[in-house]
Image (cartoon, rainbow, N blue to C red):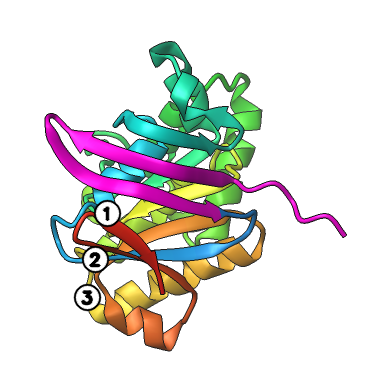
Amino acid sequence: MTEPSPIIHVSKVSIHQGKLLVLRDLSFSVHPGEFVYVVGKTGSGKSSLLKMLYGDVPLADGKASVVNFDLNALKNKEVPQLRRKIGIVFQDFQLLADRSVDENLRFVLQATGWKGKSKMDYRIAEVLDWVGLKSKGFKFPWELSGGEQQRIVLARALLNEPQLILADEPTGNLDPETSLDILKLMRSISDAGTAILMATHEHDFLSSYPARTLRVKDGYVYED
């Protein structure tokens, strides 16, 4: 049986932030449904790696493709198209405080080309149910706990049925028990077929819920 094409393929890539060389000679692939940790100290380059993958930081050299987009040839006008195929999860939630949960999710759907209120309502209910918050659509972000807000961020990332989710320290602002709940939810999303690349400094995760691990250290990425 032929192995499916990788969701991410990176070959001999270097990444700069301004004039600073952050990472060099990166080579790895991620396949559909795979769950992969990215670990390393603060400032090691984990976030730069994720930013490169969603088109926010250009490649200095090498080749990379993400969800069938060639990052070497990616034009600025194509970045929104790339991000529609990727779910992005941030540590600091980035929810709109003056809008309800439903309105936050509807905003994303409208921005990515969805039409029809009933169709959008159905999809919003679907993703909220998936993350266990179907009854919280009327709430505002500030009325939710940190763990609930991060579940909403995961729901937002799932709206366009992405092939890939890039998560940058998604449990960094959460207590240990809530962090574990979010990890379990992300693992279930991966088991359902969405590839996840998760940057984290929570080393307990690696022993409790082992998975393939990319380690960022001294400007290189190593596979454990």
The residue to which callout 1 is attached is: 46
The numbered dot on residue 40 is 2
Q: Could you say whether the residue bearing mark 2 is in a helix, strand or loop?
A: loop
The image quarter containing residue 34 is: bottom right
Q: Is residue 6 magenta?
A: yes
Of residues 63 and 42, the one nearer the viewer is 63
| Of pointers 2 and 1, the one earlier in the residue sequence | 2
Of residues 104 and 39, the one nearer the viewer is 39
The image quarter containing residue 97 is: top left
Q: Are marks 2 and 1 in contact (CB under 8 Å)?
A: yes
- Residue 15: x, y in percent? 27, 38
Q: In this picture, is 48 found above or below 82?
A: below
Magenta stretch: helix, strand or loop mostly:
strand
The image quarter containing residue 108 is: top left
Q: Which segment is the magenta one?
A: 1-29
Q: Could you say whether the residue bearing mark 1 is in a helix, strand or loop?
A: helix
Residue found 63% across the figure and 67% down from its top: 191
Residue reaching furthest to the bottom: 208
| Of pointers 2 and 3, the one earlier in the residue sequence | 2
Residue found 46% across the figure and 28% down from its top: 71
Q: What is the three-letter code of the residue carrying label 2?
A: Gly
Q: What is the three-letter code of the residue carrying label 1?
A: Lys
| Of pointers 3 and 1, the one earlier in the residue sequence | 1
Residue 217 appearing in the image: yes
Q: In this picture, is 110 found above or below 21?
A: above
The numbered dot on residue 175 is 3
